[in-house]
Image (cartoon, rainbow, N blue to C red):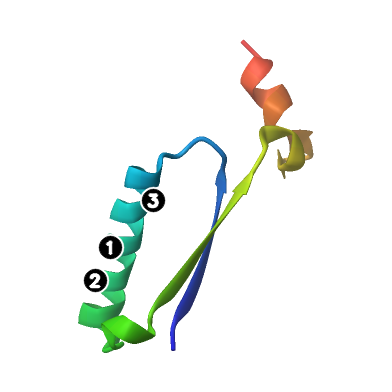
Amino acid sequence: MPHVQITLLEGRTPEQKRKVAEGITRVLVEEAGARKEAVSIAFLDVRATDYARAGVLVADQKRAP
């Protein structure tokens, strides 16, 4: 029952998420012996104003030259 939780800054398309889900599922089946039906993946989209790196909001980092 592998469960993968992926946190991304919002903006990925459903097609991008489909490809990521397919790839991660494939790796877990091939490398970890998981059953495809047992793999679940959750995408958590966060706004750039709700995520910080090195003490700075990502939204502010994007504005820096």
Q: Earlier in the sequence, mark 1 or mark 3?
A: 3
Q: Position of residue 63 (x, y in %)?
A: 66, 15
- Assign a secondary structure to mark 3: helix
Snapshot quadrant of residue 22:
bottom left
In this view, 27 is above or below 45: below
Spot occupied by residue 49 in the image (x, y as percentages of width and height): 74, 34
Spatial separation of the CA atoms under disc 1 and disc 2? 6 Å
Please, is residue 3 above or below residue 21 in the view? below
Residue sitting at x 28%, y 88%: 35
Q: Amino acid at mark 1?
A: Glu
Residue to which mark 3 is pinned: 17
Q: Amino acid at mark 2?
A: Arg
Question: Residue shown at 63%/22% (left/top)?
Answer: 62
Q: Which mark is residue 22?
A: 1
Q: Position of residue 44 (x, y in %)?
A: 59, 55
Quadrant assignment for the C terminus? top right
Q: Of all residues shown, which one is farthest toward the right?
A: 55
Which residue has dot 2 on it?
Answer: 26
